[in-house]
Image: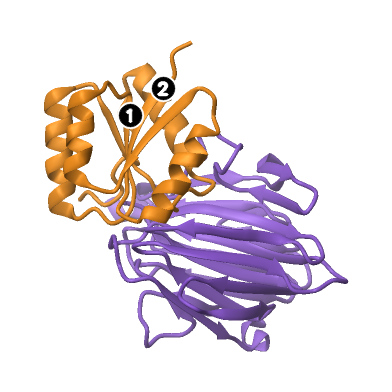
Amino acid sequence: MWSEICDYKYLFMANTVLHKAATRGHANHGWLDSYHSFSFANYYNPERIHFGALRVLNDDTVSEGKGFGKHPHDNMEIISIPLQGDLQHEDSMGNVAVIKNGDIQAMSAGTGIFHSEFNKNKNEPVKFLQIWIFPNKKNVAPRYSQVTLNVEDRHNKLQQVLSPDAGDGGVWIHQDAWFYLGRFDKDFSVDYDLNKKTNGVYVFVLHGDVTVDGQSLNNRDGFGIWDTDKISIKADSQDAEVLLMEVPMNI
Amino acid sequence: MEKIQILVLCSHEEILQTIVRLINNNEKWNATGTADAERAIGLFHQHTFDLVLLGSGINGKDEKKLRRIFTYQNPEIRIIEHFGGGSGLLSNEIEAALSDNAQGNVNVIDDPFKK
């Protein structure tokens, strides 16, 4: 029988792309130490422009009291995930907020906004991820939102932190994208079912070692998978932390 | 050496000024900016541009019209959309477009919203 000689998984092989942490773009401006998973500013690699709708993944450390002065954005969904310290945000819509580990911030730049981001603290650096997603709708009204999540709710599970639905868990954006955070005990494993078949998943390791669909990953490695409807994740070290970003591949 | 001439259209005046300033920080590039679609068409008729960069606030109807007019006048013209409003993507987008021009390639991210 055909089904006996042909394994389903070999007929529908997923595509993958691996970005080891050490191969990322890097810029150290003194006050800002930034690693770029995709081409950004002076880092230009034509092989690493975007992963579907995911255009920017910057791993930033900002020195005490320093930050990004007032600057504009438009037509981009901008997500900030603080990892350590306090990040102060101010924007042209009148929002003033401080976000810290456990918070997720999303901003739809739409027709255009100006904002600034500073390390609120004078005694420790702030570390955060800045993620930019191409929107599925241009020139929307600018919008700001943030949520505080219970970090215990991601222990040995995938905690949804972003979706396209305002009524769903986490923040929402103008794109068919879903983000999840997880912190796992060693040897814990979990399967992730994609929300949409045409999407891909970019896994970014925040801490420790994991294996994703047979690919070993270490701290700050990135691994993109598409043409699949499910991925498996296994923690290879205690307190391994991952960020899953499911995004449309056709933009 | 002749500078690369870039026409920038963006309806948000402050962002337009930022984009033009950032482009002109590169000594190899020269930006001409306008917030008005009709004025952009006029500028395109009067001057020779290597690249057109479309920023925020341009509605779909105007964008189609501009693309049609620009391409009719200069079939080789490269038209790209800029995302992020004068952000860290600006240089990348221009470099990629110029590189593609040199290679005769089509940039797959020149219009991320096309179906």
Checking the image for residue B39, the label placed there is none
A32 or A187: nearer the viewer: A32
Question: Chain B is shown in which shade?
Answer: orange
**Label whose residue precedes the other's in the sequence (2 or 1):** 2
Residue pushed farthest right?
Answer: A123
Give the amino acid at mark 2: Ile
* Residue B4 numbered tag: 2
Q: Position of residue A135 (x, y in %)?
A: 35, 61
**Image height check: is A221 above or below A43?**
below
Q: Position of residue B98 (x, y in %)?
A: 40, 25
Tag 1, which chain?
B
The residue marked by circle 2 belongs to what chain? B
Would you name the residue on which mark 1 appears?
A: B51
Q: Position of residue A235 (x, y in %)?
A: 69, 67
Q: Is residue A46 in sight in this rendering?
A: no
Asked if disc 2 and disc 1 are in contact, CB closer than 8 Å, the reply is yes
**Position in image of residue A83 (x %, y %):** 71, 70
Q: Are marks 2 and 1 on the same chain?
A: yes
Q: Looking at the image, is A140 positioned above or below residue A250? A: below
Task: Determine the CA span between mark 2 and mark 1.
Answer: 8 Å
Neighbour tally class for label 2: few under 14, some 14-19, many 20 plus, Cα within 10 Å = some
> Which chain does purple denote in the image?
A
Q: Quadrant of residue A211?
A: bottom right
Residue type of the residue flagged with mark 1: Leu
Vertical comparison of B33 with A234: above or below: above
Nearest the eye: A163 or B54: B54
